[in-house]
Every structure is written in C-alpha cells, then in structure tokens.
Image (spheres, rainbow, N blue to C red):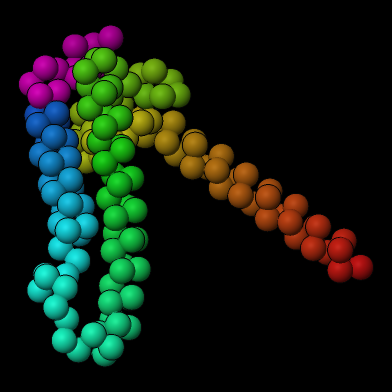
Amino acid sequence: MKPKDRLDRRSAKEIERFLKERYTKLKQSLRSVLTGRYPDGGRRSAAAAAKAIETLRDEIQVTVMDSRSRELAQIETALERLSRRDYGICDDCAEFIGLARLRALPFAERCTPCQSQAELQARRTARRLSVDMGAVAYRSAM
Ligand SMILES: [Zn+2]
C-alpha cells in the first residue's frame, strides 16, 4: 500500500470528531422530537381543530425519526470501524475507499468501483425480479 492509500491519523480523528458531533446532534433532535410533542404542556385549547394537523405531524415525525435512527446506526457502525481500525476499507475488495470519498460520504462501505458494481448488480436483480413477476402475472392472467 502506498502511504496515501490509507487513512492517516489526522483524517481519522477529523472524521471521528465529525461523526461524534453529528451523533450528538441527532440524539438531541430525536429526544426533542420525543419530548417536545406538546410544547404548551398538553393544554391545547383548539384540540379538535388541531387534531388533523397533529396526526399529520406525528406521521412526519415518525418518518423523520426513522431516517435519523438509521443514520445513528450508520454512525455507530462507522465509529466502531474507526476504533477497530478497519474504517475506510471497502467491504468488497478490501482496498482503501479513499479520503475524498470518505469526506463526502463518511458512511461509505465500498470504494467507488465496487459501489457502482453493487448498484449495477442491484439494478439487474431488480429488473430480473420485475421480469419474473411480469411472467407470473402473465401466466396467472391466462
Ligand atoms: Zn472496493
């Protein structure tokens, strides 16, 4: 491996700090979503009128919380890998993912070529599946 083909300590620290900050922020915002539901302490006067908006807001919050929880899990994985020192190593080819890519995508688990390969593969599988499903639909329609 060339010296620049791995994560240097300074960049590792930098990414770790970024991930930890993001983690804390996400945790805080998740907590405020959970506790800040009724900012007026539950004394909602126009309760009936607000009900529809309330429901919609709950649904949005669930979606937001879902994506934030997912991001929290990704950060946890990245921090774990940082501490095991296998952060930035491609899952598929075990090469260094590259600092530029990691800075842009701190949760990247594959290098660029492997990622495009994986996406191509996923698209092919999806297409094959939809062709299969189409065939099934066609057969059952007969
Ligand atoms: Zn790779």
Q: Main secondary structure of the magenta part?
A: helix
* Residue at the (44%, 39%) spot, across then down: 116
User: Horizontal and vertical percent for residue 108?
Assistant: 32, 35
Q: Is residue 93 above or below residue 55?
A: above
Residue 46: tell me if it is visible.
Answer: yes
In what quadrant of the picture does the N terminus appear? top left
Q: Within the magenta stretch, is there residue 67?
A: no
**Image-based side of 96 in relation to 125, left or right:** left
For the residue pair 84 and 6, the one nearer the viewer reads as 84
Quadrant of the image occupied by residue 102: top left
User: Horizontal and vertical percent for residue 25?
Assistant: 12, 47
Residue at the right extreme, as displayed: 142
For the residue pair 124 and 81, the one nearer the viewer reads as 81
For the residue pair 4 and 69, the one nearer the viewer reads as 69
Q: Is residue 23 above or below residue 93?
A: below
Residue 96: tell me if it is visible.
Answer: no
Q: Is residue 65 above or below residue 83?
A: below
Read off the magenta span.
1-13
Q: Is residue 2 above or below residue 100?
A: above
For the residue pair 34 and 57, the one nearer the viewer reads as 34
**Image-based side of 24 in relation to 57, left or right:** left
User: Horizontal and vertical percent for residue 109?
Assistant: 36, 31
